[in-house]
Image (cartoon, rainbow, N blue to C red):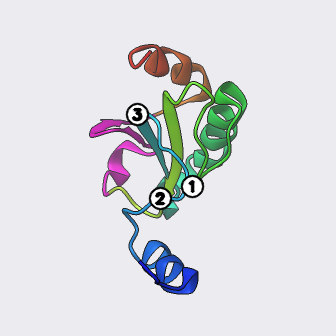
Amino acid sequence: MNIPVSMVMGVVTFYSFFRMNPVGRHTITVCMGTACYVRGAKKIMEAVEKTLDIKPGETTEDRRFSLGIQRCLGACGLAPVIMIDNDVHGRMTPKKLDQVLELYK
């Protein structure tokens, strides 16, 4: 197509729906808004990272899960919150995480 790589990268990095790496079947988004963070979202993120052995922006080797961060999911009354695909899971704890992930395996 005779398009410079810089132009392609400009488009890919500008639009949030473009990905440079494969995404998983399920997307896990951990809310890091103020209410969630104060109520333990950092511990939830650490538990997800440890359980799935991935960091934000990565996908598990079996391509089942991708991990992301969102500044606010708008469910502050249920903090801390994670979202898997379109399902919101509130009052999350590291212990509850394993049970929730089992629903998506």
Name above or below for residue 53 compared with residue 10. above
Kind of residue sitting beneath label 1: Tyr
Residue 39, image x, y percentages: 55, 47
| Pointer 2 residue | 19
Residue 26's label in the rendered image is 3
CA separation in Å, label 1 and label 2 = 27 Å
Q: Quadrant of residue 81?
A: top left
Q: Check disc 1 and report its element: helix, strand or loop.
A: helix
Query: Residue, x 59% and y 52% (percent of image)?
Result: 57
**12 and 84: which one is in front?**
12
Residue 8's label in the rendered image is none
| Pointer 1 residue | 37
CA separation in Å, label 3 and label 2 = 15 Å
Query: Residue, x 47% and y 64% (percent of image)?
Result: 71
Q: Check disc 2 and report its element: helix, strand or loop.
A: loop
Query: Residue, x 58% and y 55% (percent of image)?
Result: 38
Label 3 or label 2, whichever lies nearer to me, is 2
Q: Which residues are magenta?
A: 74-91
Kind of residue sitting beneath label 2: Arg
